[in-house]
């Protein structure tokens, strides 16, 4: 994984872009308009992380497993609060 931090572009990026070797994840996409020394920039600023494909598969799998666990715990709490 390579975290490229905040980047800017004149074109709005897709949330996820896949090429031959990498998966590029763009988050916190915000339009910006900025003037610096009489030069105007109209575009987008966003966070960009680059994963190799195997890393991304692992990341998605771990994320899904955590979400499933969170849902299961929430359901147990609801069941217990019902006093059944």
Image (tube, grey):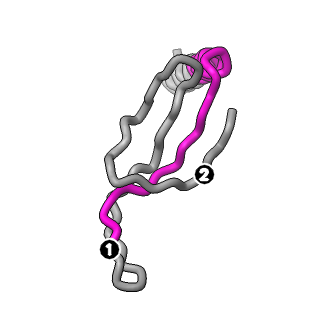
Which residue is under mark 1? 40
Please tell me which residue is depicted at 41% across the width and 80% down the height of the picture: 36
Going by the image, does 44 lie left or right of 68? left
Q: Is residue 18 above or below residue 25?
A: above
Query: Picture coordinates of residue 67 (x, y %)?
Result: 56, 23
Q: Which quadrant does the N terminus fall into?
A: top right
Per the image, label 2 sits on a secondary structure element best described as strand
Q: Residue furthest bottom?
A: 37
Query: In this orientation, which residue lies closer to the viewer: 57 or 62?
Result: 57
Q: Quadrant of residue 48?
A: top right
Query: In this orientation, which residue lies closer to the viewer: 75 or 43?
Result: 43
Query: Picture coordinates of residue 47 (x, y %)?
Result: 52, 49
Separation of residues labelled 2 and 1 (CA atoms): 22 Å
Which residues are drawn in magenta? 41-66
Q: Is residue 5 above or below residue 55?
A: below
Residue mark closest to the camera, 2 vs 1: 1
Please tell me which residue is depicted at 60% across the width and 23% down the height of the picture: 63
Per the image, label 1 sits on a secondary structure element best described as strand
Exactly how many numbered labels are in the figure? 2
């Amino acid at each position: 994984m390579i975290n490229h931090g905040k980047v800017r572009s004149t074109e709005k990026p897709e949330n996820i872009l896949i090429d031959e070797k990498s998966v590029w994840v763009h988050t916190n996409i915000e339009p910006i308009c900025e003037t610096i020394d009489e030069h105007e920039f109209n575009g987008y600023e966003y966070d960009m992380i680059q994963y190799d494909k195997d890393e991304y598969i692992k990341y998605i799998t771990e994320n899904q497993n955590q979400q499933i666990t969170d849902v299961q715990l929430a359901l147990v709490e609801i069941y217990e609060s019902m006093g059944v």
